[in-house]
Amino acid sequence: MINYNFHLHSRYSDGNSEPEEYVLKAIELGFTSLGFSEHSPLPFENSFSLKNELVDEYVSVIDNLREKFSEKILIYHALEMDYIPNMSTDFDYWKKRCQTDYLIGSVHLVKPLGNSELWFTDGPKHETYDQGLNDFFGGDIKKAVRTYYHQMNEMIDTQKFDIVGHVDKIKMHNKDRYFKEDEPWYQNLVDECLSLIKEKDLIVEVNTRGIYKKRYPGLFPDGIALQKVKDLNIPVIISSDAHSPEELNLGFHNAISKLKETGFTEVMKFANGEWDVEEV
Ligand SMILES: [Zn+2]
Ligand SMILES: [Zn+2]
């Protein structure tokens, strides 16, 4: 049983509940630890990230919960950092400012070359994905996906963090419409990204959100990409990327059986300030 989750969003970013409600639900589920990972502040108006002026409040709210429930559960505060070239603030700045226990690095907004607008590749609507693909890349899916992975690689190469968030989420709204995951050009991009992750000793997240939100029938990553993670011996962590307390452990059974099927015997867990392994 996986009795922890280190990727979740409360109302301090785009989640729907107070942090304490997640803690109470986690205790009810028998969790031993919980990590809050709000979307990092961004230098422009948006509806999903932690507001700059709420950073200190967020940190103190989580610290208070850590104290209040210290007998029952270990609580950590983290951030899910958004990497946007020449736009997002250095990860180190936020790590120090928030005294985070760990950081997740993710790409949700792709910056097309020579364009100041951003392609939002996440969220519930495939229409937004399709429109960005047409407007910013002239419908050229290879160019668009290559830009996503290059941004991912640049993040891995230049920023300091612990977990690579939903590494292949770019496939979510594709749903086999523009490309198939086993196409060599796509697998080359996956290979390049995973070898960089290996080189930097990072953890790959196995994210269940696509499944329980019914946005994608598998995990991020799964299939060939997950097998490659295994073959490279890259450590993994299961998380649900919860945006409500009810989502704290959704998809975990599915992820565990998929990991076992792929040959994994261990997953990562954060405990007392460091990463440790646990049998899956
Ligand atoms: Zn994310
Ligand atoms: Zn997230």
Image (cartoon, rainbow, N blue to C red):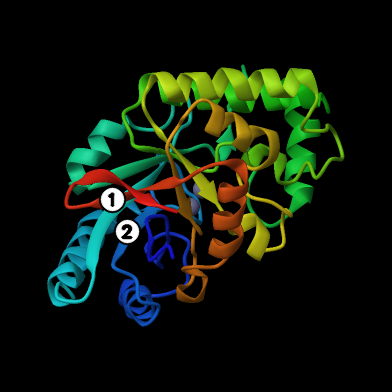
User: Measured from the top left, where is residue 18 in percent x and y?
Assistant: 36, 75
Q: Give the camera-side residue of 62 and 55.
A: 62
Quadrant location of the N terminus in the rendered image: bottom left
- Considering only vertical position in the picture, is 111 above or below 132? above
Instruction: Confirm if mark 2 falls within 8 A of ligand 2.
Output: no
- Residue 118: tell me if it is visible: no
Q: Give the camera-side residue of 251 and 278.
A: 278
Q: Residue furthest right?
A: 177
Quadrant in the rendering for residue 179: top right
Instruction: Confirm if mark 1 falls within 8 A of ligand 2.
Output: no
Q: Mark 1: few, some, or many residues within 10 Å (few <14, many ≥20)?
A: many
List the residue tagged with mark 2: 35
Side of 120 relative to 237 (left or right): right
Side of 10 relative to 263 (left or right): left
- Considering only vertical position in the picture, is 62 above or below 221? below
Residue at 49% from the left image edge and 63% from the top image edge: 242
Residue at 42% from the left image edge and 62% from the top image edge: 2
Residue type at mark 2 is Gly
Side of 90 relative to 122 (left or right): left
Query: Marks 1 and 2: which is nearer the front?
Result: 1
Residue at 57% from the left image edge and 38% from the top image edge: 109
User: Measured from the top left, where is residue 239 in percent x and y?
Assistant: 47, 55
Give the number of the disc on residue 270.
1
Residue type at mark 1 is Phe
Residues at marks 1 and 2 touching, judged by CB atoms closer than 8 Å = yes
- Residue 55: tell me if it is visible: yes
Q: Mark 2: few, some, or many residues within 10 Å (few <14, many ≥20)?
A: many
Quadrant in the rendering for residue 225: top right
Tell me the SS state at disc 2.
strand
Q: Give the camera-side residue of 269 and 156.
A: 269
